[in-house]
Image (tube, coloured by chain):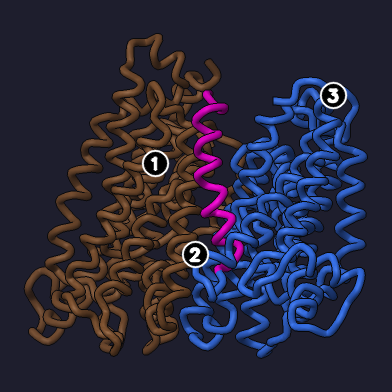
Chain colours: A brown, B blue
């Protein structure tokens, strides 16, 4: 009952907050697009985007920087929404795509790919284009294994988490075995991948990622009613006539798909799925639709800023974005934790 | 299931006997062929043969370290799950392992530290620092220290430390080469001195936790009830938190970050002896020791003659068993 009251009480202008966060996302995108070896002013960036300005600027922007930035935007949104769904379903604040093994499964598949398809000179025998597909398969197969193992007249959230953690540990162990058996060169390649980086994103990858991310996020938004009901607990949800197990499975699949496509292109960028929904819940409250949109914005912001810092801070050396997501997000999260009073769900 | 205090009490000597048996097995089995008789003679009638040397200087420290590190991890996991009232907590969630790894990698990268002895002090310092940070951060603010804030601050600090660690390793490949094995966690090739340095702290923390285990029972009902019954919950949490961090810190200092033991052992133990912490803590100590000894023996056989890090092996052995128990017993 307390929960229902909290849902009703959440009137902290989530709409304005969400608009604000997406304005910030846009600003960071423009600033990030302007910085690099050939700096462009924000005005130049905008005019180049609308087809004005000189060709040179447009090539740098459209061919080199923009795919990466758009990729960061969608990866961030996908991971954050995936985390928001998982934390809602499991009602555990520690739940995140990293925790239940989805990311670990993708990492395992990638390390497998790097070792199986490379010859003695450390060069790959098949095209690197296949890597995202491998990662996606690793992520989804692991998630399906977790669901299957926790299925027993339906999926109990608590059992799902425990078994997810166990499977994650198993996959990590497998990854370590594989890395230790391989040469050090591949070990460092694999470390960069598992840290997560969107270095080398191109438009064809964006065209694969974008429609799927949009589709799955729309599905999540359409299921908002079920999501809110599931958060009340299984008994109440069943009582008000919700198909608890069916809806939970659908939402889990949506969440898995979002993480799967994000890690396929960006590697194991961690903490976005964990931190973004918490930050959102502390600012706009626990109602799923506003919380989900807001965390999508926060997630995009985290990955964009992380990628921007990673690109510029130690130039010409690239620091993978995954290093910075927590370095940027965690301090802000701790600040919120200390200064704010508990506001619902978190 | 052990339902009565008599069966639970009987389980303790049986468990200790089993641990001693596994320690014996750890002396005997491995790449170099030795027999139980060799192991017996090494201590009763020593000579300078290779077998005796290996048993005394390589396998004996290893068996002792595995048993103690396992016990530390099991008990600290049980304590942390209890004070955060989150069944998913473990030393790694509260930032202890991440803090230790962070300090060690910093030492390797910036101070070019190489000896395991200095890794030990660095990681102990890192573990303590991370825990204090988590504790202070989660006690700040108007609501005071709630289990939720403790858990969240812990995972945020873990995220922060491990991301910086990863960044340092990505930028510095030689450091990665040097610490990769430490980061995976291992009880092999650790000198007995490491354990002897840490042993006084371990024993004090274990005994202190066992003696006051009753207060964990009160705490696990909920903060309000605990306060109502006259408990100063912040002090209790800090006391047990300190015990847990000494145990987990010693474990990571000796053997590197070994995940998973701290999280699954308390679950297995609760499904065996119930919810009374006076039984959970000693049984977690025994369970942790058994898992780590088994994993260490197993790690010698998987990739023979190469050895796997024991942290990998705990997962490979523990996971199938844990999934089986989770499906059968935890039908929530």
Q: Main secondary structure of the magenta part?
A: helix
Residue A328's tag is 2
Q: What is the magenta range?
A: B308-332
Query: Whole-percent x and y of residue A82?
Result: 35, 45
Residue B5's tag is 3
Residue A146's tag is 1
Subunit bearing disc 3: B
Out of A305 and B220, give the one closest to the viewer.
B220
Out of A226 and B248, give the one closest to the viewer.
B248
For the residues beneath circles 3 and 1, the answer to whether they share a chain is: no
**Residue located at (45% from left, 36% from top):** A160
Q: Can residue B253 be seen by looking at this rendering? A: no
* Mark 3 touches mark 1? (CB < 8 Å): no
Taking the magenta stretch, the answer to whether it contains residue B322 is yes
For the residues beneath circles 3 and 2, the answer to whether they share a chain is: no
Query: Whole-percent x and y of residue A20?
Result: 36, 50
Q: Which SS class for mark 1?
A: helix
State which tag comes first along the sequence, 2 or 1: 1
């Amino acid at each position: 009952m307390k929960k229902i009251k909290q849902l009703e009480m959440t009137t902290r202008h989530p709409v304005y907050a969400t608009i604000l966060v997406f304005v910030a996302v846009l600003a960071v995108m423009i600033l990030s697009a302007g910085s690099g070896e050939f700096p462009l002013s924000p005005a130049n960036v905008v005019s180049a985007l609308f087809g004005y300005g000189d060709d040179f600027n447009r090539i740098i922007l459209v061919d080199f920087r923009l795919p990466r930035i758009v990729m960061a935007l969608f990866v961030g949104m996908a991971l954050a929404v995936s985390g928001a769904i998982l934390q809602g379903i499991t009602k555990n604040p520690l739940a995140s795509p990293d925790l239940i093994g989805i990311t670990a499964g993708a990492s395992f598949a990638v390390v497998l790919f790097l070792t199986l398809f490379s010859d003695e000179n450390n060069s790959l025998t098949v095209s690197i284009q296949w890597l995202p597909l491998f990662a996606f398969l690793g992520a989804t197969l692991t998630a399906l294994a977790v669901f299957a193992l926790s299925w027993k007249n339906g999926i109990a959230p608590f059992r799902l988490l425990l078994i997810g953690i166990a499977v994650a540990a198993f996959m990590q162990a497998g990854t370590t075995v594989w890395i230790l058996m391989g040469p050090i060169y591949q070990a460092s390649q694999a470390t960069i991948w598992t840290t997560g980086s969107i270095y080398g994103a191109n438009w064809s990858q964006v065209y694969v990622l974008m429609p799927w991310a949009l589709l799955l996020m729309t599905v999540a938004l359409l299921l908002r009613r079920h999501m809110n009901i599931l958060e009340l607990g299984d008994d109440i949800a069943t009582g008000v006539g919700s198909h608890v197990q069916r809806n939970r499975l659908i939402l889990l699949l949506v969440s898995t798909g979002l993480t799967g496509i994000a890690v396929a292109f960006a590697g194991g960028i961690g903490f976005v799925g964990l931190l973004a929904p918490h930050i959102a819940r502390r600012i706009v409250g626990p109602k799923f639709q506003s919380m989900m949109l807001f965390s999508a914005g926060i997630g995009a912001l985290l990955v964009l800023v992380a990628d921007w810092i990673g690109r510029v801070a130690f130039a010409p050396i690239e620091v993978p974005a995954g290093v910075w997501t927590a370095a940027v997000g965690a301090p802000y999260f701790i600040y919120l934790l200390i200064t704010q009073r508990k506001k619902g769900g978190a | 299931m052990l339902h009565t205090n008599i069966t639970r009490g009987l389980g303790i000597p049986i468990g200790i006997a089993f641990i001693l048996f596994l320690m014996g097995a750890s002396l005997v089995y491995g790449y170099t062929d030795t027999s139980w008789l060799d192991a017996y003679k090494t201590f009763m009638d020593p000579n300078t043969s290779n077998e005796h040397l290996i048993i005394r200087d390589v396998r004996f420290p290893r068996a002792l370290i595995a048993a103690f590190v396992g016990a530390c991890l099991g008990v600290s996991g049980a304590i942390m799950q209890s004070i955060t009232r989150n069944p998913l907590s473990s030393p790694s969630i509260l930032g202890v392992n991440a803090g230790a790894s962070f300090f060690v990698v910093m030492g390797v990268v910036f101070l070019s530290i190489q000896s395991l002895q200095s890794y030990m002090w660095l990681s102990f310092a890192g573990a303590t620092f991370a825990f204090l940070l988590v504790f202070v951060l989660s006690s700040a603010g108007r609501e005071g220290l709630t289990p939720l804030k403790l858990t969240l601050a812990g995972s945020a600090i873990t995220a922060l430390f491990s991301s910086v660690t990863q960044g340092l390793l990505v930028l510095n490949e030689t450091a990665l080469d040097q610490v990769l094995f430490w980061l995976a966690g291992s009880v092999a090739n650790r000198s007995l001195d490491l354990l002897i340095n840490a042993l006084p702290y371990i024993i004090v923390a274990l005994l202190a936790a066992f003696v006051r285990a009753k207060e964990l029972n009160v705490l696990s009902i909920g903060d309000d009830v605990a306060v109502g019954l006259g408990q100063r919950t912040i002090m209790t949490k800090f006391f047990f938190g300190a015990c847990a961090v000494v145990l987990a810190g010693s474990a990571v200092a000796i053997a590197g970050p070994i995940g998973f033991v701290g999280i699954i052992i308390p679950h297995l133990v609760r499904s065996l002896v119930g919810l009374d912490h006076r039984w959970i803590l000693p049984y977690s100590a025994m369970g942790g020791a058994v898992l780590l000894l088994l994993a260490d023996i197993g790690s010698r056989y998987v990739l023979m003659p190469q050895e796997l890090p024991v942290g990998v092996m705990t997962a490979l052995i523990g996971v199938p068993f844990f999934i089986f128990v989770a499906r059968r017993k935890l039908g929530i």
